[in-house]
Image (cartoon, rainbow, N blue to C red):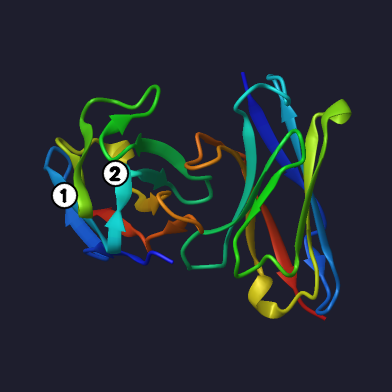
């Protein structure tokens, strides 16, 4: 199975700053079949990005995804207070679908 | 508006079978291309895909759990179910149901299942 490794584990930033989150796969994720989710405490994950770069319905354009092959990035251009959360990547190019261990974006 | 709601016991004993149900409202359960999945998250750990089912009953399981998992659908009642047998403490997790085959567009709020005697 494809193992996804996210970095950093924790990102300490201030509102208004830019956040760059990395997701690296143990083997190539074909067709850029990679998704990103946001999870806040006590809540279910919310889909942000699919196909590596397509925003899900209702997701603000400050969220953007990029990458291909084994290296993917989620960028939040300007952090809003509601963006402080844990972010997970997930690949769906091979079965089983697998998730990364998450990156926590916390207020500095 | 589509909503998903998990239900089931909060506490189950080791070696027993967990049974969970996900009720779907606000949308046709049998819509074309609508696949329904289960994902779990042990406390403080990452998410793990359990399996996905189509309203026809076709299933896709995580190989690591396949020997213990059974998913089923009940279109007339707009719900689908998960059974996980031979439970151990490592099955303690928040269990989510979700819409999606490859990635998951919408999730339920989750139900916490603790495996303990």
Q: In which quarter of the image is residue B33?
A: top right
Residue B84 lies, in percent from the top left, at: 77, 64
Which quarter of the rendering shows the C terminus of chain A?
A: bottom left
Disc on res. A3: none
Marks 2 and 1, the one that precedes in the sequence:
1
* Secondary-structure class at tag 2: helix
Q: Nearer the viewer, residue B5 or A92?
A: A92
Residue B32 spot, x, y in % from top left: 64, 22
Q: Say which residue appears at 29% left-offset and 44% top-offset.
A: A32
Above or below residue B17? Residue A20 is above
Residue that protrudes farthest toward the left in the picture: A17
The answer to whether A11 appears left or right of B76 in the picture is left
Q: Which chain is indicated by disc 1?
A: A
* B113 is higher (above) or lower (below) than A46: below
Side (left or right) of A93 relative to A70? right
Camera-side mark, 2 or 1: 2
**Residue hosting label 1:** A20
Residue B49 at what x, y percent from top left? 56, 56
Residue occupied by mark 2: A32
How busy is the neighbourhood of tag 1: few (under 14 within 10 Å), some, or many (20 plus)?
A: some
- SS for callout 1: strand
Q: Can residue A72 be seen in this view?
A: no
**Left or right, residue B110 beside residue A12:** right
Left or right: residue B17 versus residue A14 is right
CA gap between label 2 and label 1 equals: 18 Å
Q: Nearer the viewer, residue B101 or B104?
A: B101
């Amino acid at each position: 199975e494809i193992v996804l490794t996210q970095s950093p584990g924790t990102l300490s930033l201030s509102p208004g700053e830019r956040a760059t989150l990395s997701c690296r796969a143990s083997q190539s994720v074909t067709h850029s079949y990679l998704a990103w989710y946001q999870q806040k405490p006590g809540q279910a994950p919310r889909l942000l990005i699919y196909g590596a770069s397509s925003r899900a319905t209702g997701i603000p354009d400050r969220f953007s995804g990029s990458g291909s092959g084994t290296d993917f990035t989620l960028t939040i251009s300007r952090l809003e207070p509601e963006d402080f959360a844990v972010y997970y990547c997930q690949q769906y190019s091979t079965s089983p679908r697998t998730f990364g261990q998450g990156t926590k974006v916390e207020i500095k | 508006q589509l909503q998903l709601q998990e239900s089931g016991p909060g506490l189950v004993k080791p070696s027993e079978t967990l049974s969970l149900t996900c009720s779907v409202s606000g949308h046709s359960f049998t819509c074309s291309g609508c696949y329904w999945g289960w994902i779990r998250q042990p406390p403080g750990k990452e998410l793990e895909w359990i399996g996905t089912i189509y309203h026809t009953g076709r299933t896709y399981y995580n190989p690591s759990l396949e020997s213990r998992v059974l998913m089923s659908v009940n279109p007339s009642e707009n719900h689908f179910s998960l059974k996980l047998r031979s439970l151990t403490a490592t099955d303690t997790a928040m269990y989510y149901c979700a819409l999606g085959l490859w990635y998951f567009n919408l999730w339920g709020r989750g139900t916490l299942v603790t495996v303990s005697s």
